[in-house]
Image: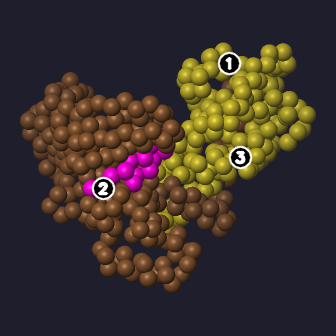
Amino acid sequence: MIEKIEQLVKGCKSNERNAQAAFYKLFYGYAMSICLRYSNSRAEAEEILNDGFLKVFSKIDLFNPDLEIKAWMSRIFVNTAIDHFRKNKKHYHQEDIDEVREISSKDENILDSLSAEEIMKLVQNLAPSYQLVFNLYVVEGYKHHEIAAQLGISEGTSKSNLSMARAKLKRALDENVY
Amino acid sequence: MEKFDQKIKEKLASYPTNESPSASEVSKMMSMLDDALPHDSKIIPINPTAEVKFISASWVKIAAAFIVFVLASFTAYQLAEVNIESGDSGLTRVELPDLSVIKMKENSKVEYNQITWIFNRSLTFSGEGYFEVEKGEQFTVLSKLGSTKVLGTSFTIYSREDTYEVACFTGKVSVASINSGEEILLMPGDAVILKSETFTPYQLSAIEKPSWVGGEFYFEDEDFINVIEALEKQYQVEISFPEEFETLKYTGYFDNTNLEKALKLVCEPLELTYEIKGKTIELKP
């Protein structure tokens, strides 16, 4: 497998369509699993996915073969999602947090009983600005100050967006909207 | 909270990744690639000893193209469209059907039609380029802001974003503003900058073609990092070096014909050694 990937990367570096097609097919599912959580619909995820793959192919010369290809690609897709968010001028929600309830162990039990697909749906239903901060903080492991710098917002906004994301997820869990 | 986050993260990480694209998605991606990374945009560096002919422009081929054109009608006309883009680095040499030559810098683009060329030497151009025009009928270069007309001469055009700049080295060059129609005549040594509708003429300090035309890069007391960047750009490589080298200054030159030679020219005066591993190069004391 590793050898196959090396071969494909080599082919992609010389701009060979066969290699690019095989690479696209091989990593489509992986890329889709990232793009879905940064979008509200499948069509939007596909848009991010296509832009991301174009970046992967045009920057593949910069890929250091000693590194993990998936980790490298993941960064590109996350950055593409951020660009996509900016381009669409989705505004950052700054609602007051008056409805945040403590997350109970009940919610955690519900989470356990849900499938990955169902959780994905919950995340997809978040408003774009909550979704973006939630993904960057929880899944990608960014710190609030890093998110603030990357998105050009304040740390406070980043924190409140995260709380709002959690609150919305919790409400969806309580109301069985999944 | 953290347990809640953690559980969601784990669930998302277990989201299936075995999905495959449909045939139509694959073909869509391939056509996007044809636009974004076309095969004919490969950069051909200029090599003075063995100049690469970018377009096969012999008269035989022109004649062949002409016959094809006569046989097929409109589709064939489109086939005769030539569209050449230089990539992100290096010089691209474009030989036109009349043997006039354009040397284009990075991110430049030229378009013309091989058939209409026979009757009318006219092309559209954006970016930066050095033109050596063979004597003959009027030769026209159209850009976004201005158009340049010549008979036989050499000149450079810079046409990027909101600036259009033409410098004349030999012969006579006429530059016109697309917006106002105003025209200005350049003699050897004359140059002009056109921003929207305003011409600002100036004199060249020396009537000699720019050094990049030869693909040579000269440095005088230049920061090491800038020299390395130029090398990386010309040869599409990645060069790593210890931090302390950043303070070095380099005086010298290299050209874009031979990577080893260029590395030697940069490394030897600074008493550095280099190691080439494919597309990555490591510099050491």
C-alpha span from label 3 to label 2: 53 Å
Quadrant containing the C terminus of chain B in the rendered view = top left
The residue under label 2 is which amino acid type? Leu
Q: Is residue B150 magenta?
A: yes
- Tell us which disc is closer to us: 2 or 1: 2
Question: In terms of image quadrants, where is residue B49?
Answer: bottom left
User: Can residue B124 be seen from the camera position used here?
Assistant: yes
C-alpha span from label 2 to label 1: 63 Å
Q: Position of residue A138 (x, y in %)?
A: 64, 31
Dots 1, 3 in contact, CB < 8 A: no
The residue where tag 3 is placed is A44
Start and end of the magenta stretch? B140-152
Q: Position of residue B23 (x, y in %)?
A: 65, 68
Image mark 1: chain: A
Instruction: Please state if A43 lies on the left or on the right of A145 as rendered.
Output: right
Residue shown at 57% from the left, 48% from the top: A52
Q: Which mark is residue A157?
A: 1
- Please say if B78 is above or below B9: below
Image mark 2: chain: B
Q: Residues within 10 Å of mark 2 (few under 14, many from 20)?
A: some
> In what element is the residue under mark 1?
helix
Is disc 3 in the same subunit as disc 2? no
Per the rendering, the colour in which chain A appears is yellow
Residue shown at 29% from the left, 52% from the top: B131
The residue where tag 2 is placed is B151
Dots 3, 2 in contact, CB < 8 A: no
